[in-house]
Amino acid sequence: MIPARGGLYNILMRIHLSGHTTLLLLLAMGARAQMPADGFPMQKGEICVVAAAGQSRWTDYWEGKRLRDNPNIGRFTSTQISPMLGWGISQRLNVFAALPYISNTSNAGTMAHKKGWQDFSMDVKYRFLQLQRKGMRYSAFANAGFSVPASSYVPDFLPYSIGLGAKTAHLRLINHLQWRNRLFTTIQTGYTAKSKITVDRSSYYNDGWHYSHEMPVPDVWDGAVHAGYDHPHFRADAHFTWSQSTSGSDIRRYDMPYPFNRMNMTTAGVYALWRLPGFRDLAVIGNAEQTLSGRNVGKAFAWMGGLQYVFTLAKKDTDEK
Amino acid sequence: MKSKALPLSICLVMMIFCVVCCDKEVQERALPSFESTAIDASGGTWRPIILGSATDISVAPASTTGSADYLLEIGQIVQMQQSISNVDRALIDQWKGNGVLRWNEKIRALVARYNLAPEPTADGTYPAPSAANPAGPPAFPFANPVYAGRAYAYFSVAMYDALIACWYHKFKNNRPQPAVASNLVQALETYQIDMPGYPSADAVMAQVGYRMLKTLFPVDSAEILNMANGHKRAKLLSGMASPSDIAAGEAIANAVVDKVMARFRTDGMGQSLGSPAQWAQLAASAKARGISTTWKSMEIPARPPMLPFFGNVKLWNINTAQRDSLRPPPPPAIGSEQFNKDMEELRGYTSHPTDEQWRIATFWSDGLGSFTPPGHWNEIAGESIARHQLSEIKTARAMALLNMALCDAGICCWDAKSFYYYPRPTQMDERIKTIGLPNFPSYTSGHSTFSGAAAAVLGYLFPDEGQRFIDMAQEASMSRIYGGIHYRFDCEAGLKCGNAIGSFSVRWGQTDGSN
């Protein structure tokens, strides 16, 4: 039987990752929206609601490639609350929407802290291929989505800015392999295009002095590998992720970060979902993740926890199996 | 339905994708580019800043246009023009406009590149940038606002004095530009037929630019030399200057820069940092003047105040007695009614800034990594110079008047800052977070002083835009309150003092023989 709550997992991962990334990086939220990036589709007519909260914290960050601390920032904390919604139009086609609220603070220094609603995002995920042989099932999905800033937040005040202010669009390919509905691995990669942004300053240094109210925001290639175990009552996985800007400059020595910086990172983490006994439609989810390497991002530890609730609008599509 | 939903969504997403991708190219403002039609033939008689007069600089008399030497030079130009490349054409295009503005843009870019604070060493001290080890770390210089203000001033003064000497010799020798003197030479850019070619004003600018900037930013000497050589080559190629025009221009530049550097090396900048004992004395003196809580660095580890004795650096248009009389009256006592009122005001701005207040605070912040507030006012001046199509010598005059005022404003403001050693708002209430807290005392506001001085000078130079400059200065001043780093009384005192300082530059301009 196909796990009915798969969509939630997607949403969670997205939440987790966007928050995580944001915080982590000196903020490159959305840099890798990873959400509808898993291999577990929702059933036809299912609606999934997720309420999740998380934090990402770092004390050290990479200034270019140099790992350093900054006593005038101290420990940086990004807190995120993410309401999310998923809908199974059919078992092959799912759509998702999310809008995180982010608060960025640190425990030292004199810089202003920032908070607010970040970027509204929408995604579609479509399963275009499924093969079965003996106990093995292979599924391939395409995911596409976009995000737009949901408020007039300030993108050019990193690391405290809650987002980069860019409109983004992404395409993603997801490969999912599952054995006897239990052991699974997911490998996915995607490309996110980002628009230039308009900032309040009228000139700035980015490998040279530029006279412009506009800043470029680098595009991002990212991906993830998951390996885990799925069960009617719980699911758990371990994952490795990577994210690479395709352009951008390094933070200069002892300078501030800017939205046009190249932000790269790899992370490793674990994820778990547990369906509450007696409440089949309600599950607790959690994720924890550590940044392993990076460039112009914080060396962050991030966690996320939440509840997901699934209910069905229409009769389930049972053509699947 | 399923079959239609998919292609539709894919199409939609691809369209969005394309729009986002195509929307990547950052639009930069066009830098001012124009060809002035003014000759300003009397320029050689204007009063220079450091030279006694233009006649202090001597130049060998020009050979006549019919002489064998000159015809040889014409031959060289003709040969260059015959084998001109696309790179050469781009070079001509790059340098066809106002050269003084191009070089002003270069120093602004260098200031921004070097406006980064030294980082602390493991023992929590901050090594001072040193011209003896410019590559660092820390890199030399730390082009902070006062270093930059002074650099802009010397750079602009050298440019102006050298062009006055150049104009003097141009009209004394009165030898035409090669493209005018010879039918064999093509004019590959717009030119003024009555402008004498000897000595070349472009060579003067290029050589002054190179000599001054390599001293101010020694690490980038090679890049600057390359730019200067490009400037000179462009004028050879375009038929605007012969090799001897250029050599004469270089000779003038070298002679003037030598005199300017003599002042530069002895103006007291070397003593502007001081020592820990002297910093303690500043605090003690301020305490004795009634400042109950004196300034301390809010950085971790505590950073020495930024050049606290910059107030003693040699001034341009006022003397030290005038500086002392311009020093604003003491700030409100800490805890007084006025203090509490202004503190409350900025608490309001910092806890709930509006989008517009944040925009203003950021637009004028001109902090680390930027060309500094004096640089911002140089950009504003450049736009007005273009709007009014000033000649290159008038451009140099405008920049010299402006930057002397900005430098004097920095000196007077730093004098007040060290005299009162007044704490920043955040020091008095650590809950006040900022757009980035500068590491020096609060009273008076540097942005306000710079802006008040700039508005006064620019209002004199471009009276039709006077109200605009006043409004900009007011906004720049307010931006520091919005940003949480100054009390209103810092800003009001700074703006007023800056205006008074600017009026001294204006008085110089009114009597320099250029009107």
Image (tube, coloured by chain):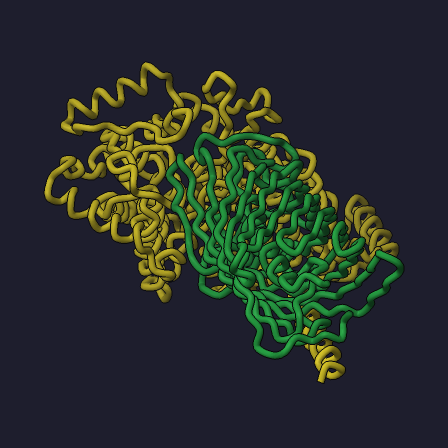
Q: Foreground residue, A273 or B374?
A: A273
Residue drawn where x is 47% and y is 39% of the image: A76
Residue B360: which quarter of the image?
bottom left
Residue, x 74% and y 46% (percent of image)? A227
Quarter of the picture containing the N terminus of chain B is bottom right
Which chain is displayed in yellow in the rendered image? Answer: B
Q: Quadrant of residue B334?
A: top left
The answer to which quarter of the image holds residue A190 is bottom right
Residue A79 is situated, as x and y percent measured from the top left of the image, at 46, 48
In front of the other: B265 or A48: A48
Quarter of the picture containing the C terminus of chain B is: bottom left
Where is residue A84? Give x, y as percent. Answer: 53, 63
Q: Specify the farthest residue to the front.
A: A278
> Relative to residue A251, is residue B371 drawn left or right?
left
Chain A painted colour? green
Left or right position of B376 against B341: right
Q: How many labels does the image show?
A: 0
Q: Nearer the viewer, residue B358 or B69?
A: B358
Q: Which residue lies furthest to the top in this view?
A: B277
Q: Position of residue A106 (x, y in %)?
A: 42, 39
| Residue A92 seen | yes
Q: Residue furthest left?
A: B337
Is residue B147 visible to the viewer in this orientation of the structure? no
Asked if B47 appears above or below B195 in the picture, the reply is above
Q: Residue at x 66, y 40 (%)?
A: A268
Position in image of residue B86 (x %, y %): 82, 57
What residue is at 65 percent from the left and 40 percent from the top? A295
Check the image and report above or below for B473 versus B435: below
